[in-house]
């Protein structure tokens, strides 16, 4: 397969439609919490890394994170692309008007002028569209991630946006595709560790959290997932001074309904954290859809 463009040629993704939400994401800007800047980055970090790996990009190359499908883009210059994360129907229409369906978690060619359309995912929430060479939008504080809470990073793409594509890496892709996951069966289960403030709750609150299902509410986004289920009752009144937060933290306001923090979470919070979802399961949480139910499993092994 030939390289997408001759050396020195400028290539772009032209955005025609964004669907409910599309943002540029990489692996974020870690280590800036003391400045009041959160990490942000891809909500499903494993999916972003996989899409980049298929194209032989660096794992932190910037790509599009697409929420619930609906994206339409046109290639300006010949491109190689890969999709990962929530599997959705994907169709490429060439400049000649002919259309073809392309695969998930595979390397695909977009001829100059071709249009790629993503439908609604069959399951999951967020799909990642990576381009060989990465999206070369200007970085902000060392990252091309868009933080929707802080308003930091590249502007959200909108119809008419031209997203520049960087030069292809020297290494060429060594696989055409990887096995795509099948549809999930049953209720997802996320592993959690006891939180730093689990002693702020009645003795059986952590057991209750891990013995009942919670529903993902529509009031959820890249900042966090608001859950509805059994009330987690506090043993103490009052509020905490602001404390540092991490992705996966299950913070519980006075109403007793937990919020699971995702990529764009605030760096501090004043409500007690009863538990923390393990890092490897935060990616699974990022694919939960409103109306879906989720369970938690207490795990004392953080590996």
Image (cartoon, rainbow, N blue to C red):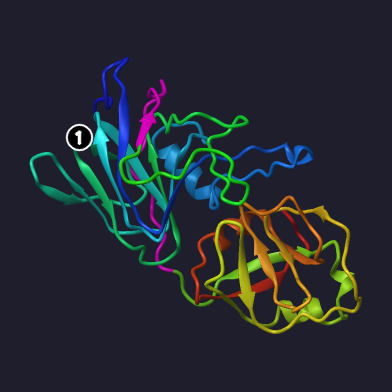
- Residue 80: image quadrant is top left
Question: Above or below — where is 146 with respect to 117?
Answer: above
Q: What secondary structure do most residues of the magenta stretch adopt? A: loop
* Residue 49 x/y as whole percent: 50, 42
Q: Residue at x 86, y 76 (%)?
A: 201
Q: Is residue 207 left or right of residue 110?
A: right
User: In front: 211, or 32?
Assistant: 32
Q: Residue at x 37, y 29 (%)?
A: 165
Quarter of the picture holding the N terminus: top left
* Residue 106 x/y as whole percent: 33, 45
The residue under label 1 is 111
* Residue 281 x/y as whole percent: 61, 59
Question: Above or below — where is 224 with respect to 144?
Answer: below
Question: Above or below — where is 92 with respect to 198?
Answer: above
Magenta span of residues = 162-183
Q: Is residue 224 left or right of residue 73?
A: right
Q: Residue at x 83, y 54 (%)?
A: 243
Is residue 297 rendered magenta in the image?
Answer: no
Res. 67 in view: yes
Total marks in image: 1
Q: Is residue 300 left or right of residue 178?
A: right
Res. 173 in view: no
The residue most toward the top is 8
* Residue 186 x/y as whole percent: 50, 77
- Residue 82: image quadrant is top left
Identify the secondary structure beneath mark 1: loop
Question: Above or below — where is 55 with respect to 190?
Answer: above
Q: Residue at x 24, y 38 (%)?
A: 110
Q: Is residue 2 left or right of residue 212?
A: left
**Residue density around tag 1, few if under 14, some if 14–19, many if 20 or more, within 10 Å:** many
């Amino acid at each position: 397969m030939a390289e997408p463009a001759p050396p020195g040629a400028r290539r772009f993704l032209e955005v025609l439609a964004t669907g409910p939400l599309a943002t540029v994401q990489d692996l974020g800007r870690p280590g800036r919490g003391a400045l009041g800047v959160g990490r942000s980055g891809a909500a499903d970090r494993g999916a972003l890394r996989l899409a980049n790996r298929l194209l032989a990009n660096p794992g932190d190359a910037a790509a599009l994170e697409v929420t619930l499908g609906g994206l339409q883009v046109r290639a300006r210059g010949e491109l190689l692309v890969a999709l990962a994360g929530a599997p959705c129907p994907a169709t490429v229409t060439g400049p000649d008007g002919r259309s073809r369906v392309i695969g998930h978690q595979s390397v695909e060619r977009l001829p100059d002028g071709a249009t790629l359309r993503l439908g609604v995912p069959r399951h999951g929430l967020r799909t990642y569209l990576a381009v060989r060479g990465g999206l070369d939008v200007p970085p902000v504080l060392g990252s091309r991630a868009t933080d929707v809470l802080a308003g930091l990073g590249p502007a959200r793409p909108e119809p008419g946006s031209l997203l520049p594509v960087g030069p292809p890496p020297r290494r060429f892709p060594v696989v055409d595709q990887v096995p795509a996951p099948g549809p999930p069966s049953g209720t997802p289960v996320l592993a959690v560790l006891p939180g730093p403030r689990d002693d702020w709750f009645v003795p059986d609150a952590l057991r209750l959290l891990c013995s009942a299902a919670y529903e993902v509410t529509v009031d959820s986004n890249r900042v966090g997932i608001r859950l509805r289920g059994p009330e987690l009752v506090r043993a103490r009144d009052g509020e905490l001074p602001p404390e540092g937060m991490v992705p996966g933290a299950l913070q519980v306001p006075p109403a007793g309904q937990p919020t699971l923090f995702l990529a764009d979470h605030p760096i501090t919070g004043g409500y007690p954290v009863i538990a923390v979802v393990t890092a490897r399961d935060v990616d699974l949480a990022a694919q939960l859809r409103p109306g879906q139910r989720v369970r938690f499993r207490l795990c004392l092994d953080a590996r």
